[in-house]
Amino acid sequence: MKSPMNAKKVSKKVMQVLTRCSKSVRQGTKLFSDWALEKGIRKTTSTYFLSRWLFLRLLGLIYFIAFVSLGVQILGLLGSNGILPVEKFLEVLKEQAGWKRFWIAPSLLWIYPGDMALQLLCWAGAILSVVLMIGFAQGPVLALLWFLYLSLISSGQDFLSFQWDVLLLEAGFLAIWIAPSGFWPRSAWKTPVPDGIRRLFYWLIFRVIFSAGYVKLISQDPFWANLTAVKYHYQSQPLPTLFAWYLYQLPLGFHKMTVVAIYLFELAVPFLIFTPRRLRRIGALLLMLYQVLIALTGNFGFFNCLIICLCVLLFDDAVWPRALVKQIVKRRSRAEAKSVWSVWVLKPLVGTLVFLSAVSFLQTGKKESILFQPLKGIYNFFKPFRSVNTYGIFSIIIERRHELILEGSNNGEVWRAYTFRYKPDDLKTPPKWISPYHPRLDWQMWIAAQGNLQQNPWLINFCVRLLEDSKDVLRLIEGSPFDEWPPRYIRPVLYEYEFTDEDTKEKTGMWWERRRLGLYSPVISLPDK
């Protein structure tokens, strides 16, 4: 009989053999895995190096479009001779809020709100966007881009209040946390994408798309309920395209099927975001296709491009060309992949953003309760940074399209109309396709036409600037119909616009027909000096 000491030695020997066998199996598995990857038999694991590389460059392009698009309009909108001068807005906020103004409207414009500062913010943002696309110091650059755009939005009033503006801020804020470490593009292959932030991107895409369908579902709008909504939406949306005119001519049955498809795209497809990667890829492709179809029929600035950009992160590296994947593996092998941020930073951040976004998502359904009020108070505390937002668009369909035409006169008898560049105006001018450029004044004119003057007091400022012959404001439209002197009077006239049918278009060449409804407001003039 063997002694206990001998039994202990045998046990130790057996453990050594098992350890060596386990190590050999792991090495063999790794060698086979590398060989299979090399031969294309096996795909890579779920990494997101290439997806992040593409996403950040597309995001840089969208930032560039946003800053340049705003830069060519900003003096007419917010400049000292613009419609809503930012300097006056900040002065009033300073008087009303005191030191709290820095939290209510976080902006670099508190330092100096002049015209030069407005232009500097826009063109600095455009330059940094190019730097982001190059791939240099992407983390710091993303942080600067986010704060520059926040500075403009927080003081942009009516003209920077669109959902794609805050969506860009929210996407840009999350992008800061997935940016690779280091200053050079090659560092992108050494820094993994944090899972928590990646899943927050998924949650963001879901919230934007699902909220768009959810608000339609609960709105009790009769046109969404009877499936005729898009029949009216094609012509009543802010800036329809030429494709919208042609789709408007199709039978009612087609429009009803389109509404059913919209419900599927917005209420069902978003759930594929949270499925295994093969189904998730299908969902991403469907969402991208949906955004392309929307962009073909309406001008929504860079909104559709931004959604497509976000969907890139739904694809892992295994979907990209094999040669690129091999290059990633080769580069990653040179250094151990390390996250930029400590878990002590990421976990509290992710938890806070999940909480705030859940509260914002609950607000989509207009659910109010005593228990919800404290949560809403916490959300409102962080709301000025516009990096966690509530979404949902076109819950109510406008059956009849109203348009405002501004007319000027020197004697009160002969009136001449101002011509806008992009919104429906001349009856023989076809609808234009201008996305991703976003003409903010034309959009606000559509919003004003659906309401009244009390809801849109900025329109009075606009008319006053036309009476003053402000060059910055006139650059936003086709100029003045008055050659030498500005008019003495301006009147906003309300019209009802409607797409023509094919026969009328063939006979008259008109894309629109209109009916005068009356004056939108009393005649506006400057006080006599």
Image: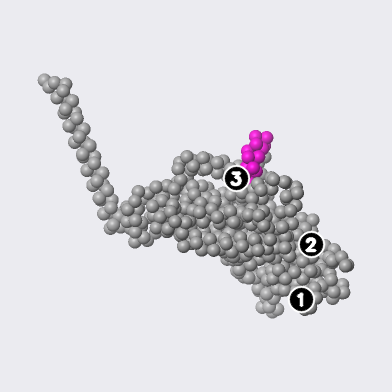
In-front residue for pair 349/400: 349
Write the start and end of the magenta stretch as one range: 369-383
Q: Is residue 276 left or right of residue 105?
A: left
Q: Is residue 491 above or below residue 5?
A: below
Q: Mark 3 and mark 1 in contact (Cβ < 8 Å)? A: no
Q: Position of residue 281 (x, y in %)?
A: 45, 54
Q: Residue 3: image x %, image y %?
A: 13, 21
* Residue at 51% in and 43% down: 350
Name the amino acid type tagged 2: Ile
SS class of the residue under badge 1?
loop
Do the residues bearing badges 2 and 1 touch, measured as CB atoms within 8 Å? no
Task: Considering the whole magenta stretch, tell me its main secondary structure.
Answer: helix
Q: Which residue is mark 2?
A: 460
Side (left or right) of 53 relative to 427: left
Locate the N terminus and report the quarter of the image it occupies.
top left
Question: Could you say whether the residue bearing mark 3 is in a helix, strand or loop?
Answer: helix
What's the CA distance linking mark 2 and mark 1?
19 Å
